Amino acid sequence: MTPRKPWREMGLTDSEYDMVLKIMGREPNRVELGLFAVMWSEHCGYKNSRPLLKLFPTDGPRVIEGPGENAGVVDIGDGQALVFKIESHNHPSAIEPYQGAATGVGGIVRDIFTMGARPIALLNSLRFGTLDNERNRYLVRGVVAGIGDYGNCLGIPTVAGEVYFHPSYEGNPLVNAMCVGLVNTAEVIRAIAGEVGKPLLLVGAKTGRDGIHGATFASEELSAESESRRPAVQVGDPFMEKLLMEACLELINEDLVAGMQDLGAAGLTSSVAETASKGGCGVVIDVEKVLRREEGMTPYEVMLSESQERMLIIPREGAADRIQEIFDKWGLDASIIGHITDNGMFTIQEGDQIVGEVLVKALTDMCPVYHRESRVPDYYTRARLFDLESIPHELDYNNTLCDLLNVPSIASKKWIYQQYDHQIMTNTVVVPGNGDAAVLRIKGTNKGVAVTVDCNSRICYLDPYKGGMWAVCEGARNLACSGARPLAITNCLNFGSPEKPDVYWQMDQAVRGMAEAARVLQTPVVSGNVSLYNETRGGKAIYPTPVVGMAGLLTDVSKRLEMAFQDPGDYILLLGEVRDDIGGSEYLCLAHGVESGAVPDIDPADEAKLIELILSLNEKGLLKSCHDISEGGLAVCLAESAIKGNIGAEVKLALEPGQRCDGVVFGEAPSRVVVSASPQDLDGISAKGKELNVPVTVIGKVVGQYLEMAVDDQVIIRQEIGKLASIWGRAIECQMD
Amino acid sequence: MYTGQVFVTLKKAVLDPQGDTVKRSLHTMGYPEVKDVRVGKYIEVKLDGATRQEAEERLDEMCRKLLANPVIEEFHIEIVEDDQ
Amino acid sequence: MYTGQVFVTLKKAVLDPQGDTVKRSLHTMGYPEVKDVRVGKYIEVKLDGATRQEAEERLDEMCRKLLANPVIEEFHIEIVEDDQ
Amino acid sequence: MRFGVVVFPGSNCDADCYYVIDQVLKAPVEFIWHKETEIKGFDGLILPGGFSYGDYLRTGAIARFSPIMQSVSDFADRGGLVIGICNGFQILLEAGLLPGAMLRNNSLRFSCLPVNLKVKTDQSAFTGGFEADEVIALPIAHGEGNYYCDDVTYQELLDFDQIAFTYCNKDGLETPGANPNGSRGNVAGILNRERNVLGMMPHPERFSEGILGGEDGARIFASMLKSFKEGLG
Ligand SMILES: Nc1ncnc2c1ncn2[C@@H]1O[C@H](COP(=O)(O)OP(=O)(O)O)[C@@H](O)[C@H]1O
Ligand SMILES: [Mg+2]
């Protein structure tokens, strides 16, 4: 008979258990073991990703708070700051899409108001398997409704996002939610424990047996076995969250709190441990004081419960009564569950009896760190060597354009974003679908902020280093296309198992690429999240998906830009090079069934120059529309600007010797945007392009009701805008309804 | 023709924010005697079937596939034969 | 302690978009025998009461005031006494 | 004219309404917490949108038992102007201050989008600033805006000119395609018989400034102001 090894069921390895033994100097009891198991999970401890996260640039003149807090904080002038972070809820959403996605939104919103900020915008980045499968459609319906219902009820607009459908996410969808908050710089709250003797207040929902070991669960591959061990699914209560948010913001407004920490993954355990750890103190908790929803809960269950909509608050001296009044006003239950000590221990009592005691720092700072083995995967080498010349040049451009517009990943996401209230708070001045990023005004100022989330995971798969750069560059470009200067980044690293050398190599490469681009573009990483073990039943990793969330600033919000062509007679210009790369494009996949080829070269320095050009042209008021070239290439970019403006375009291109026509029309080479401008502004634009060393090419005119593209004087595309609009507009709806 | 009555309820351990909110409001409305409220669904399905047993089996299948979400809900069926 | 079971259904004259959608889904899923679906609420209320009749009367009042909306809904109550 | 914005737990368009009155209309405005039992010194009330009590059970069902609602009802009886927007409309229906009830959108989905509306009557304090049959644009954002009433009630709404707004296409036709939620007769907003209470699903506060995409919403609040001043004069 093999001896029972309870730590394994909790997700700890034998060698990790040995470390626990050494730290404790004795065998831990079940409660103590549970604390280690959740705190040392990847989700809380970042044991596989910490060495990589160190590579990110995290400092900059505008950074008030970088990674390490609940969310990053970035100065936007006038004594105001943006607070933002992105977080994954992939595994819960795979099991229960509606509640998984809803509680994901709830979690990220708490991270923002924990910092003292009023949440002003939500974004999300979603990945699903293909829509031809009913299970995937079920996941899409559930996730979208879950995100919508939660944010809508809270009254925070969901203003932007991205959605892709690809077989690599079959069975393991990705649901990443980002929240952006606004705070007066002087009122930023940090999760720091106060002096010895200070009470800890737990407020919000009652504690039940929900999601026990959720953090561990999120750090494993999904399997039949993990599903059977599945804890009670957490159900979101957005109404409770709304009350909690209003009450907490009121406390902060009246300067009543010394510290505040939300309860997220690993519940009370992680939130108490992290607060104590940051404050460098100890803490005593009495589990009997924790208000419960269910009877007979053990200390272990109370400590590990992941019941949603709860907050830990450390009141300022003498503020307890007023705090109680505010909670009463909002109908919230609060109880004092413990207090700060000076012995550095995390002590758990059940009444008078100590049921567990662990060094706080053992849970936070002593979490093991793994430098995993990395290996260049064969597919990568093959992709780079793939002979793109073997792809036939001939094709029906009209059909291909229509087919591309009909690809759900490219088509209008209206079916999705119409389920999100994107106008509440009356700040959204560029609504979803109209620009490359959403733009919000800041009431009481002339400023605006632009926000976006981006990642092209096919590119990341084929070349994770370039893919990492790609995501950062695309995010920054999207902000610039809306007229905003990129400020800073949050990111969510969604990968497979880091224990697989191929996957670890992907992570390592992607992070290096992101870090390099972030450095060049001067957009430091201020927060983020890591979601590993995203694998399907067959043990296949998802495409590497390092999602980049970015925020930018418009000093004058009246200068915001959208993608729609405006007036007949305007000129259409390409800023950036005329390129013909087809490697890794949607076109290559759709028309030729190939997901391979060397990824187009990308240089963040080129991106930086392009962004400077866009911003300086826009500053002078020379641009009427702006839209970047991404999936589907130049043709899709033009079609979208035309559809949005409900007006046609005539475009003429000339090939350089050796260039492929299909590549020029459908290739996705980065660092390029299409703008439109009045005829009298052409000279100014060209001159500025020369000055900043960015190629500027006049490629056509806004005119009529057709999109017409000619290459070397031969018309290859001529389509009515109304027809393109209907294909592009209805592609997702047709599959969902 | 049969009428199937399907009762869909949240599993016991699953939080029911709706039920809790209704309970609180009943208290403020002057019904302190209410100890617990759980809100579920009641679905009436009219269906043909050769026999009552067949109808019941098919309905049970529909519940497992569509009408209830096995991750968080339980269901219970009652079936009656309609008068001609 | 009593358990009240409250069934809230839409009145016949009121269209039930949810029921219609469920019916259509069931048809596409291969259940053509389904003729009609109506989706209502099933609310379980645990309550104290001196007598069963009192509990029932109070529950009926709660339904008329809060649990059902007479403009669109009908309700029906069943009450059982819980074992000690 | 002094406006009050009633705040229920879960209201979330309260601040937006306040902002429009304060910053766009430049009129005095205050929040009124739902636990208040008296409404004093106000000339117009706004019941804002949101998810009062999480929209649990039925939209507006629980909020209508808030202490403030008795005073809202008294205020309306005294002839005070009351506008319920979205969730505020749902609360007015549940409270019986307006006839009918709300069902889920027939798409079963929440819908957030701009719609065209036809102003069906200019004979009210809320619509006096419009031409009858004028087509205006306002955004909607709701999951339950499928207005229902029985035949008798509907006929009464017509007979007494109580329909304030209907959903229409850009040419002013009340087509099924222009109806975003399945509401009876494309109804988007209704008045009470006395014409001092309006409930509407679209959000006028969201289209009250050009920067947000439209200004038709501000005209509703401006109409209220104007009619109040005329009433005094
Ligand atoms: N990929 C990443 N890039 C930068 N910072 C990260 C990344 N992943 C996690 N972090 C930072 O690590 C800290 C812990 O994150 P997390 O455990 O998600 O916080 P929380 O418990 O508040 O949800 C946060 O400050 C977060 O911003
Ligand atoms: Mg946190």
Image (cartoon, coloured by chain):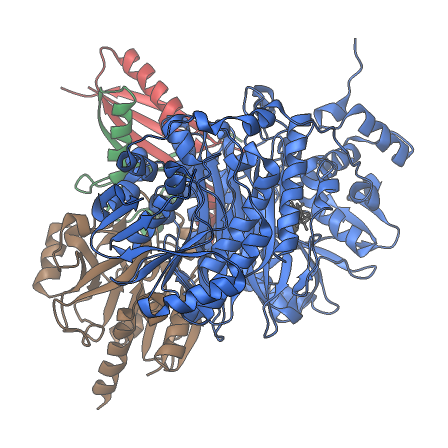
Chain colours: A blue, B red, C green, D brown
Q: Quadrant of residue A547?
A: top right
Residue shown at 24%/67% (left/top)?
Answer: D198
Residue shown at 30%/74% (left/top)?
Answer: D75
- Comparing A115 with A517, the one in front is A517
Q: Quadrant of residue A377?
A: top right
**x and y, in percent, of residue A646 in the image:** 25, 54
Left or right of D23: which side holds B13? right
A597 over D113 or under it: above or below:
above
Q: Quadrant of the N terminus of chain A?
A: top right
**x and y, in percent, of residue A79 in the image:** 61, 73
Can residue D174 be spotted in the picture?
yes
**x and y, in percent, of residue A305 in the image:** 64, 39
Residue shown at 79%/11% (left/top)?
Answer: A2
Taking the view exactly as shown, the residue that stands out farthest to the right is A25
- Comparing A718 with D61, the one in front is A718
A291 over D228 or under it: above or below:
above
**x and y, in percent, of residue D46 in the image:** 34, 70
